[in-house]
């Protein structure tokens, strides 16, 4: 699938792609992966039109998956994570680190200094 993703991401004038009969089409979520990486010029995949709402849905699902993955990684490292959007759709990320929420990061001396206000 990786070579197909590269192909559709680099070919800015590609309008139609038909890979029916190719082994790559047997992979789960094959169509979603191609649509996700394709330029907007790709209008048809395997003789099926790529609708704008399909493209938006696939991209939205990927963004959701990435955000969930980032949250899990942040939690694993003892950080809280939130995403903020402004009126223009610009997003910012706020991450707070709490060394006391991650047992691997706790150190008696470090914790003592934090609690006594010496840091």
Image: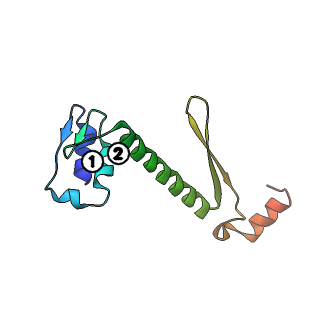
Q: Which residue is mark 2?
A: 36
Element at label 2: helix
Q: Which residue is mark 1?
A: 5
Residue situated furthest top in the rendering: 88
Residue shown at 27% from the left, 32% from the top = 41
- Left or right position of 83 against 118: left
Residue 3 lies, in percent from the top left, at: 22, 50
* Quarter occupied by residue 92: top right
Element at label 1: helix
Residue 115 lies, in percent from the top left, at: 83, 61
For marks 1 and 2 on the same chain, the one whose residue lies earlier in the sequence: 1
Which mark identifies residue 41?
A: none
Residue situated furthest right in the rendering: 116
Q: Are marks 1 and 2 in contact (CB under 8 Å)?
A: yes
Q: In front: 32, or 103?
A: 32
Badge nearest the viewer, 1 or 2? 2
Q: CA distance from mark 1 to mark 2?
A: 8 Å
Residue shown at 36% from the left, 36% from the top = 52
* Quarter occupied by residue 74: bottom right
Residue 84 lies, in percent from the top left, at: 62, 41
Q: Is residue 30 above or below residue 91?
A: below
């Amino acid at each position: 699938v990786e070579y197909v993703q590269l192909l559709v991401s680099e070919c800015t004038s590609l309008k139609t792609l038909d890979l029916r009969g190719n082994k790559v089409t047997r992979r789960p979520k094959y169509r979603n992966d191609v649509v996700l990486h394709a330029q907007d010029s790709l209008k048809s995949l395997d003789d099926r039109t790529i609708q704008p709402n399909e493209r938006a849905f696939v991209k939205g699902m990927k963004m959701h998956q990435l955000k969930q993955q980032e949250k899990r990684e942040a939690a694993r490292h003892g950080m809280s994570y939130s995403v903020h959007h402004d009126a223009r759709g610009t997003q910012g990320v706020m991450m707070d680190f709490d060394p006391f929420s991650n047992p691997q990061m706790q150190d008696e001396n470090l914790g003592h200094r934090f609690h006594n206000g010496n840091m």
